Each structure stands twice: as structure tokens, then as C-alpha cells.
Image: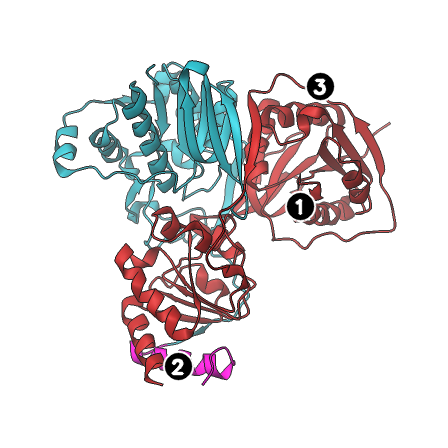
Chain colours: A red, B cyan
Amino acid sequence: MVREREILVVAEHRGKELREVTLEMLRKAKQLSGQAGYRVSLAILGYGISDLVEEASWFGMDKVYYLKHRELEHYCLDCYKDALKGLIEEENPLLVLIGHTATGMDFAPSVAMSLNLPLATDCIDLELIDSGLKVTRQVYGGKVNVELQVKPHKSYIVTLRPTVFRPAEKTERKAQIVEITPRLGRPRTRFVRYVKPEIADIDISQAELIVSVGRGIGERENIKLVEELAEAIGGVLAASRPIVDSGWLPKTRQVGQSGKTVKPKLYLAIGISGSTQHVMGMKNSEFIVAINKDRNAPIFDIADVGIVSDLFEVVPALIELLKEK
Amino acid sequence: MPVNVVVLVKPVPLREQDITIREDGSGINLEELKYGINEWDNYALEEGLLIKEKFGGKVFAVTLSSKQRDPEFLLRECYAKGVDSAILIHCEESEEFDPYLTAKVIYEVVKDLEYDLILCGVQAFDDNYTLTGAFLAELLNLPHASIITKLELLPDKKIAVVRRELEAGVEEEVEVDLPALFTVQTGINQPRYASLLKLRSALKKEIRVLGLNDLGMEEKAVLDERKMVVRRMYRPIVKKETNFLEGSAEEVSRKLIEILREKGVLSG
């Protein structure tokens, strides 16, 4: 009997909650299966999470594999690799989808290399075609899109960028749950603990007006200038990653995937190029203004108002006009 | 107990340049660009040098690059910062490599080095694959941890305790058996600059240059092993209409304030 090929989504969860990227992958998987009639299944690795597995089984997939093992209670590279390798070898899925997150980025390459399967990372789109797989990715800090052809292979692994696809919705149909006890080797990496972020003096995620400063500011002492503008507007000062990496502002002021997600009425980006990681943290702002001298900076792709100019001329002019009133 | 560290460094186009796409969409116009160390690798390099200062041992810098990226200059900078030995795998075809080939070629060199630790950046600014480190670890049968923001070595216990950056400011502390490979996130340290004096003396240092032939591979045939090839490159399609303001600094500032007041974002 010829078995229908399968699209396998690897769930991401933390603290007994399914993470949004899992539902986004399920939506994409269903879209791909709709055209060709592939089965969609979800792999959940963990321990003591039967409620989560039960809850997840209502999102319209055909099957849920619950890979249950004490060693999988927390994320562990070797355990994930062993467990998924076993499942992929057994089920031979056509496509495996993994989130391009801190966790997915860590184990996906090990699984792919150990099975000698092609892996395309951080994809914003994909399409199964006769001659293999076609994926779209972003390169050069989001300035360029590239379409890659993955050569024909028995299986493909793709990591999908979070927040690109809409999440799948709950259905009336419950999937079959298959519990598996994976065989694991001795792990060479071991979870110790989570480290929570420090408490902020100001919570930028609650601010209505944000003036945010990026790499274009050049030097630490120039930050004063942007701070002055934030005051003149009555807003809060925030920053993109390079400013925080340099130690010029505290981590609590960082906007982006690894920092805070903000949704202010106004996001004024000053000297920020708009890397993917940054944009993920602010793209839902109500009104976005960008000042940058590079016309090709990706920040302009999402800005409502753009000023292509030297910030050291525009920012002082803005401050003066705001004070005039 | 001395700790030997291998650091992978890649020359990439410097930021703040116009990246232009070839007319046929087959790739980037690489010839017109200026190159320097990949930002993430610079933090990995600094971390390697800090380990050497603390524990003793040697730091090896390894680069795979075509000529146009000026890898020799990058490796001279590494020498000037304190690296003990620099290896250049020179390969013109590397511009067309996929991450599998990149990792495989680097593996052929690194496997013969004496190391306790391998460090590289989380990702490269240009191709953004986030794969070279983890692939290399798998080929060398080493454990790895990616996106690290803190590294503490306990060489006598043969372990490292690292912090991995997750999302929204949360981090994960992980204990890893040594030898291991870590991919380093920006901000883990404050990278040093190479002084002119040290750069000058670095000119005398020898860079070990290897070609694919030295690694038992063939320049032309190697590309057939790729699992992925570039179909086309293009500018992202922009859905949002941006209102670009033009004029002098004062003019654009006036216009902006007017827009913000109309929108009700600013009072007055």
C-alpha cells in the first residue's frame, strides 16, 4: 500500500503553553497539503504535558505524535535530535517544519545533518514543486529576498520565520494522538534554569509615544540628542539592539525579538535600519516614522512617513520646532 | 589549564553600503563592495581572546573565502588583536557554496587542529543561514549551544556553563560537555580594536593558505554536492505606501509635526 506523504510540524512550547509559531506552521502546512492531499501531523516533545497535547489536537491536523520522555521536560539539544531522528526515520515525512526561533535554530541543523537532509532556514515562504522545493528567504539584513531551489530529496526540513503566517484556528475535529517513548542517548547539553529579564525603570511596552535610536547615532554621547527629542515629544526613549550591545542603554530599552514588543501610537525610528529582529518588535505600532540616510534601509518598507536625511540635521530642527510652541 | 580555541571568521560586506542586485537576478554585485569581519564573528573572536587571557592556550582563526572579500586583511587584523595562528581556506567557488559545503570544507581543516572549544558568530550578515556552526559541530560529533550571551568555562570539570538568548529578554542556562562549539550573539563582550602599531607588525605574520586541492576536493566538482542553489534575488516587495517627506531639515520637520498633529499623535 502506498502511504500518503506527510508534512510534519514540530511544536514549540514553553511553560506548558503552545507557542504561536506552532499554529503559524500548521496553517502553512495545511495550505501546502490542500493542494496535494498530504497528511499533516504535529510532533510534540515533552513530559507531563498531556493537557497541552490534548488542546493542540484540535487544530485540524490528522495526527499528533506525543514524544514523551522525562529527559524532554526541558529543551535539550541531544534529546531533541535523537527523538526527532527516530520519528523522521520511522515516518519518512516529505517535509518537516520547524520554527526559526532560538530553540528551532538550535536543533534543526543537528537533525538535518545527522540524517543528511537538506535544511533551508528562516524561510518566509515555501512551495513544493516537481523539481524539489522552492523557498524564499531574506538576506543582507532584509534588504534582499532570495529564492532558493532545494534539490530533489526524499525529505526536506524548513525553519519558518515567526509572525509571517497567520495562526491556524481551532476546528471541530480532534486528531488522533499517538504516544511514543523515544530512545535517547546520554545528553551532552543539560538545561539548568531560565533567567528572567531584569526589572525596568520604565516599561517601554506600555508607552504611547516612543522615540527609538539605532546604530546611525554613531557615538554614545549623541544619544543625548535623541533623548532630548523624546522629552520634547513627551515620549519614551528606546533603542535597537546595537545600542544595547554597546552598553549605551540598558537591555530593558531594547525593542525587538529578543527585547520588548511595543505597539505605541507613534514609533519614531532614528538611525535604525530595521533588521528583521527589530521589526518583529515594533511592526504593529499604529504610526511609524523613520529618519535614516539610507534610502534602501528596510525600516522604510514599514514606515508611514519616511525622511531620507541626516539625522544630525533633522533631529535638532525637530527639537527646536517642538520647543517653539 | 590552557584552553585552545578555534574561531571561525567570515569577511562580509560592510553595512551602510548600497547592496545592488545583478541585472539577471542571479546574485549581488559583490565586486563593488567593501568587506570586513562579520559582526557576530567579531564578538566570537573577542570571546576567544578573553579565554586565552584567562586560561592561556592558543587561538586559531579560520576563514573560508574568495579573494575579492580580502580575507588576508581580515586575518591580519586577527593577528593584530592577539590570534596565534591564522588559516585561510581560499576558494573562489565559495561564493556559490550552500551551508553544507561551507561546513564540510571548514570541517576538513578544523578536524586536524587541537582545540577545546570552537566559537563562531550566530549568523552572517550577508547570507543569514545560522547554520555553519551547528553543522560543523555535527560533523565533528561535538555538542553545541547557539546564541550564547554568556560563557563560563570550567576546564578541570570539562564543562562550560552558557546562557542562550531566547525571546523577550528570557535566557536559558545550559551546561555543556567540552569540547564543544558555541555560536556567539552580539553584546556578549566589547570587542577590542587593533592598534595601527600591531596591525603593522601583523604584516610579518604568516597566514597558512589552503586550497580545496589540499583538502582532497576538486574545485569544480565540489559544487555538484550542493543541496541548494540560488534561483533569483530581488528587492522585497513593499506593500505599505510610505509618505516620503522632502526638503530642508526645517521643512521636513515642519511637515512631520503637522502630520503628527493632524493624526492626533501630538497635541497642539
Which residue corresponds to the image point at 41% horizontal and 78% vertical from the top-left? B256
Q: Chain of mark 3?
A: A
* Camera-nearest residue between A161 and A35: A161
Q: Is residue A191 above or below residue A301?
A: above
Element assignment for label 2: helix
Q: Residues within 10 Å of mark 3 (few under 14, many from 20)?
A: few
Q: Residues within 10 Å of mark 2 (few under 14, many from 20)?
A: some
Please, what is the three-letter code of the amino acid marked with disc 3? Answer: Arg
Q: Quadrant of the C terminus of chain B?
A: bottom left
Q: Which residue is mark 1?
A: A19
- Residue A38 visible in image: no
Q: Is residue A202 left or right of residue B210?
A: right
Q: Do the dots labelled 1 and 3 sit on one chain?
A: yes
Span shown in magenta: B246-268
Element assignment for label 3: loop
Q: Chain of mark 1?
A: A
Label number found at residue A183: 3
Q: Give the mark nearest the N terminus, 1 or 3.
A: 1
Q: Do the dots labelled 1 and 2 sit on one chain?
A: no
The span from disc 2 to disc 3 (Cα, nearest Å) is: 65 Å
Which percent across, then down, holds residue A236? 44, 65
Which percent across, then down, holds residue B226? 51, 30
Q: Quadrant of the N terminus of chain B?
A: top left
Which percent across, then down, holds residue A180? 78, 26
Please, what is the three-letter code of the amino acid marked with disc 2? Answer: Lys
Which percent across, then down, holds residue B23? 41, 54
